[in-house]
Image: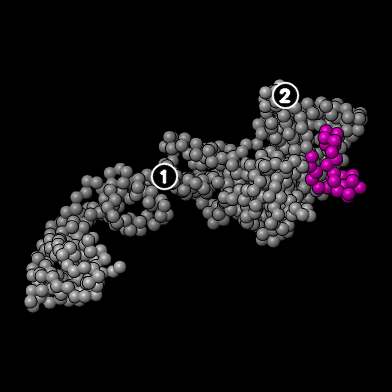
């Protein structure tokens, strides 16, 4: 192997997304151009007005520490207050913020608003660029930035003075970015890809192209995907990242995909900015979210954004690259004050495709102020059960530790008592392996029970099991003559359970001291026995059938009262009596006698072709009749018609049809 090939093989490739943030005219776009050589402002209006309006995109490749190659997708966001909506869309899925403060202005209103938005979105890492450092006042601005950030996640972030005009500090900034990203892990592949669309356009001869930041998993060329929240399928023809054709795109990459069969628009099977590309089986969108809201403690009391967020308020929810109108229902509080948190429900005007653990931003109905942010606790919430005890418990637990996979799995199962394992936390930021491992840990701690495809809260399962056992034992005590409890009766008693849970319960019981016998279940130790009050009825039935073994009474004639009916069922279950069809009842010995006669006829009689639809004679002791049924396995194709046969000459005439 050549030396350069060996070196290349040892390099670790990492993909990250970086977004700028800061006040308008603080030099964010100029800084991106100085770093990459590419002007992110592409619109004529942006160049004419010299401000960023739409999101801009480019790439920076840096050598990191320890043989790392860092591929950094850069999203340049607008700083003007009129375009905060676009800023939120660009900062929604980033790994690192390039936070800009200009020497000539210092800390400004949109500097503060962008900081709060980054905090609401859960961005924890940043590099601070003090721009226009060719002007005087760098030390003062640096100190001001450090003071403003001292109680935030960016308190210990590197601060680098830079000047896009004379390129001073640009290399230092690159080293700072490389140092910060080298110590970070790229976005994980959890097998749940989501591409939040920030651009959608059509190219002649190619068709629809959408771009966005990919998170959660890979997308591959030729893959079938689903467009959410419309929930329709499409197929990826090709994939690019920063102009390079790819077979697949990984999490943390700026990604463009070609969907030739999808039109751009707002129709039911059209695509636009704000939509999400995901895998084929990711779950459904929802118009209700249960969330944890937070109102920043940094809000100035004089700022309109600091007004208490009241129950029933109308807001705009910014999630991913989309915006949704919604109404807030607070669980406990009447209003949310700055510096406080509250559990709430967002009732959206249109469906949203969100995961447990997703961050979002709230802006007021006028879209002039960023008023709060939050975290999704239940992406498939129910408006009817929001205030139920089970839902309150789930939301309270998740609000304290939303990233704890064990807690999230346990709370999901505990809410319903039991559920199928396959869709468990499907719409979450946890991988299937993480969820499965958490389930096993919870089982080892006896917090949940796993039975086949069902996962159940341990206490709920034991209660369900105990209730079923008590019902079976009571049936044995009440009807000792029966072989067991009819499963239909037990199912009716467990009517609040799904068929899957019920079957799992039966299997669980049968693995421990119970047995399933056809349509009934019983304890292994149960031995059916007639109680004294039914023994007389059973004796009478035996006597009646013995007197005329081949001219028996019908079920209706025998089961004249409840005792007789119970006794008859016991005799049938014990095999003393054979039911032939709907109304023919024979003692087992009589049944055996007649089947032997039929076997003799079958083996020694005429050929099948000669007896079709003809009368045949069998010798017997008396007259009898059968209802159109098959008598024995050897004559499964022989059907005896409803015809009474007389024995005047000690013969039984049967008409039998042999079915082909």
Name the residue: 51% across, 46% down.
Answer: 424
Badge 2: few (under 14), some or many (20 or more) residues near its Cα, within 10 Å? Answer: few
Which residue is tagged 2? 4
Q: Nearer the viewer, residue 262 or 455?
A: 262
Q: Going by the image, does 35 lie left or right of 644? A: right
Name the residue: 86% across, 48% down.
Answer: 43
Occupied quadrant, residue 542: bottom left
Give the colouring mode of the picture: one colour
Badge 1: few (under 14), some or many (20 or more) residues near its Cα, within 10 Å? Answer: few
Which residue is tagged 1? 452
Whether residue 475 is visible to the viewer of this picture, yes or no, is yes
Please give the label number shown on residue 160.
Answer: none
Query: Which region is colored magenta?
Result: 32-58
**Quarter placement of the C terminus:** bottom left
Instruction: Indicate whether residue 44 is drawn in magenta.
Output: yes
Rounded to the nearest angstrom, the CA distance separating label 1 from label 2 is 52 Å
Seen in the picture, residue 573 relative to 509 is either above or below; the reply is below
Instruction: Indicate whether residue 336 is drawn in magenta.
Output: no
* Percent position of residue 582, x then y: 24, 69
**Quarter placement of the N terminus:** top right
As helix, strand or loop, the secondary structure at mark 1 comes to: loop
Q: Nearer the viewer, residue 382 or 451?
A: 451
As helix, strand or loop, the secondary structure at mark 2 comes to: helix
* Percent position of residue 364, x then y: 73, 51
């Amino acid at each position: 192997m050549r030396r350069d090939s060996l070196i290349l093989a040892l390099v670790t490739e990492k993909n990250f997304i970086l977004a700028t943030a800061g006040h308008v005219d603080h030099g964010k776009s100029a800084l991106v151009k100085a770093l990459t050589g590419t002007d992110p402002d592409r619109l004529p209006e942006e160049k004419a007005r010299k401000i960023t309006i739409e999101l801009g995109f480019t790439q920076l490749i840096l050598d990191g520490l320890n043989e790392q190659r860092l591929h950094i997708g850069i999203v340049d966001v607008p700083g003007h207050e009129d375009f905060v909506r676009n800023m939120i869309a660009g900062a929604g899925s980033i790994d690192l913020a390039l936070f800009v403060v200009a020497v000539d202005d210092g800390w400004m209103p949109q500097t503060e608003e962008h900081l709060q938005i980054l905090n609401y979105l859960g961005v924890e890492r940043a590099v601070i660029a003090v721009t226009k450092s060719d002007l005087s006042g760098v030390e003062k601005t640096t100190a001001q930035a450090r003071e403003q950030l001292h109680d935030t996640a960016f308190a210990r972030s590197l601060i680098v003075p830079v000047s896009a005009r004379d390129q001073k500090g640009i290399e230092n900034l690159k080293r700072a970015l490389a140092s910060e990203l080298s110590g970070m892990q790229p976005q994980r592949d959890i097998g749940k890809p989501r591409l939040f669309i920030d651009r959608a356009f059509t190219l002649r001869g190619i068709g629809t192209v959408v771009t966005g930041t990919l998170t959660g998993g890979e997308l591959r060329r030729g893959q079938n995907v689903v467009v959410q929240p419309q929930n329709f399928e499409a197929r990826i023809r090709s994939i690019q990242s920063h102009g390079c054709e790819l077979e697949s795109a990984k999490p943390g990459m700026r990604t463009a995909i070609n969907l030739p069969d999808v039109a751009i628009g707002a129709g039911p099977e059209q695509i636009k900015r704000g939509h999400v590309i995901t895998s084929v089986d990711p779950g459904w969108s929802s118009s209700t979210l249960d969330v944890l809201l937070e109102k920043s403690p940094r809000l100035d009391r004089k700022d309109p954004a600091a007004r208490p967020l009241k129950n029933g308020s109308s807001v705009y929810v910014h999630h991913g690259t989309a915006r949704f109108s919604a109404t807030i229902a607070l669980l406990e509080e009447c209003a949310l004050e700055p510096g406080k948190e509250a559990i709430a429900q967002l009732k959206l005007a249109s469906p949203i495709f969100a995961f447990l653990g997703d961050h979002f931003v709230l802006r007021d109905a006028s879209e002039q102020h960023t008023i709060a942010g939050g975290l999704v606790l239940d992406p498939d919430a129910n408006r009817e059960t929001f205030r139920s005890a089970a839902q309150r418990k789930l939301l309270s637990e998740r609000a304290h530790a939303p990233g704890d996979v064990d807690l999230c799995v346990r709370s999901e199962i505990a809410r319903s008592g039991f559920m199928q394992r396959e869709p468990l936390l499907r719409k979450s930021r946890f991988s299937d392996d993480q969820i499965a491992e958490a389930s096993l840990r919870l089982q080892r701690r006896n917090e949940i029970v796993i039975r086949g495809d069902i996962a159940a809260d341990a206490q709920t399962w034991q209660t369900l099991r105990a209730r079923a056992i008590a019902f079976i034992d009571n049936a044995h005590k009440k009807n000792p003559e029966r072989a067991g409890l009819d499963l239909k009766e037990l199912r009716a008693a467990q009517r609040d359970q799904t068929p899957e849970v019920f079957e799992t319960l039966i299997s669980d019981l049968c693995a421990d001291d119970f047995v399933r016998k056809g349509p009934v279940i019983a304890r292994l130790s149960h031995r059916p026995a007639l109680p004294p009050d039914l023994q007389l009825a059973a004796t009478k039935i035996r006597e009646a059938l013995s007197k005329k073994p081949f001219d028996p009474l019908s079920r209706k004639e025998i089961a004249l009262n409840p005792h007789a009916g119970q006794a008859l069922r016991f005799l049938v279950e014990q095999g003393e009596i054979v039911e032939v069809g709907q109304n023919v009842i024979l003692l087992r010995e009589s049944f055996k006698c007649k089947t032997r006669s039929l076997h003799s006829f079958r083996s020694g009689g005429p050929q099948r072709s000669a007896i079709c639809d003809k009368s045949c004679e069998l010798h017997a002791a008396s007259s009898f009749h059968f209802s159109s049924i098959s008598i024995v396995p050897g004559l499964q194709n022989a059907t005896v018609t409803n015809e009474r046969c007389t024995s005047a000459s000690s013969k039984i005439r049967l008409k039998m049809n042999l079915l082909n």
